[in-house]
Image: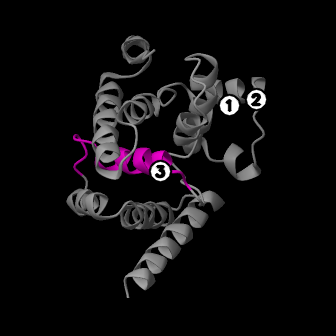
């Protein structure tokens, strides 16, 4: 049974209006990408909808919630509060929303860092987050074009932007999963080119 209407009501009370609108837009983008790439549209919509469920929860509460629920965090993860909402969200959707679909749980978990060998749904939610309707950063149109052409090309574009931004802003760490995701997507593009030739 689809519980999206229930999740929407909970998210409305849990997120700022801006974040709530973003979540609805990511759900729609995920659904469109799922249709394009042959994935279950309903599952993609749900994953997009809940991906930022913990984003507006204070960092200290997110960390406490993760530790209370047995999360094993690396030093880099503990030191990177901006990553908390994805890790915390993956626990929250399983525990509070009672979502058992591991693909949705992982899509929430890795929508910020990415990782090596992402599933199709993980890629869809990762990209949908970059290209949702309200996004208007420099280069968003390039991201949208690449998303239609190739998820891996869009991932390289998005992660290239993320890594550069982290370095430019003097952030302390680039998560190893992000480097792995970038290299993995580059390797997939290379393989696809070789197959075409």
Tag 1 secondary structure? helix
Q: How busy is the neighbourhood of tag 2: few (under 14 within 10 Å), some, or many (20 plus)?
A: few
Residue located beneath label 3 in the image: 120
Q: Examine the structure image and report whether residue 134 is included in the region drawn in magenta.
A: yes
Residues at marks 2 and 3, CA–CA distance in whole angstroms: 29 Å
Residue 75: in sight, yes or no? yes
Task: Magenta stretch: give its range.
Answer: 118-136
Give the image quarter of residue 70: top right
Give yes or no for contact between labels 2 and 1 (Cβ–Cβ under 8 Å): yes
* Residue 63, numbered label: 1
Local SS, label 3: helix
* Residue 33 - label: none
In the rendered view, tell whether residue 176 sits above or below residue 109.
Answer: below
**Residue located 43% across and 62% down the image:** 165
Left/right placement of residue 31 relative to residue 15 reads left
Percent x, y for residue 55? Answer: 48, 31
Q: Main secondary structure of the magenta part?
A: helix
Q: Which of marks 2 and 3 is nearer the N terminus?
A: 2
* Residue 97 picture location, percent across and down: 55, 17
Residue 142 in picture, x, y percent from top left: 24, 64
Q: Where does the C terminus fall, quadrant-wise?
A: bottom left
In which quadrant will I find the N terminus?
Answer: top left
**Neighbours of disc 1 within 10 Å: few (<14), some (14-19), many (20+):** some
Left or right: 51 as drawn, with respect to 74: left
x 44%, y 85%: residue: 194
């Amino acid at each position: 049974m689809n519980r999206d209407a229930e999740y929407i009501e909970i998210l409305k009370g849990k997120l700022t209006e801006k974040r709530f609108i973003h979540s609805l837009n990511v759900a729609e983008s995920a659904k469109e990408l799922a249709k394009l790439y042959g994935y279950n549209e309903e599952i993609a919509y749900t994953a997009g909808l809940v991906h930022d469920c913990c984003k507006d929860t204070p960092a200290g509460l997110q960390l406490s919630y993760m530790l209370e629920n047995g999360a094993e965090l690396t030093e880099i993860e503990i030191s990177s509060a901006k990553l908390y909402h994805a890790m915390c969200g993956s626990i929250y959707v399983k525990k509070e929303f009672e979502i058992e679909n591991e693909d949705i749980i992982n899509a929430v978990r890795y929508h910020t860092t990415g990782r090596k060998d992402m599933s199709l749904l993980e890629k869809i939610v990762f990209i949908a987050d970059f290209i949702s309707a309200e996004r208007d950063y420099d280069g968003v149109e390039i991201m949208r074009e690449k998303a239609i052409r190739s998820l891996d090309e869009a991932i390289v574009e998005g992660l290239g932007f993320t890594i550069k931004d982290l370095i430019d802003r003097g952030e302390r760490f680039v998560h190893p999963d992000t480097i792995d995701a970038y290299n993995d997507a580059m390797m997939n593009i290379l393989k696809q080119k070789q197959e075409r030739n």
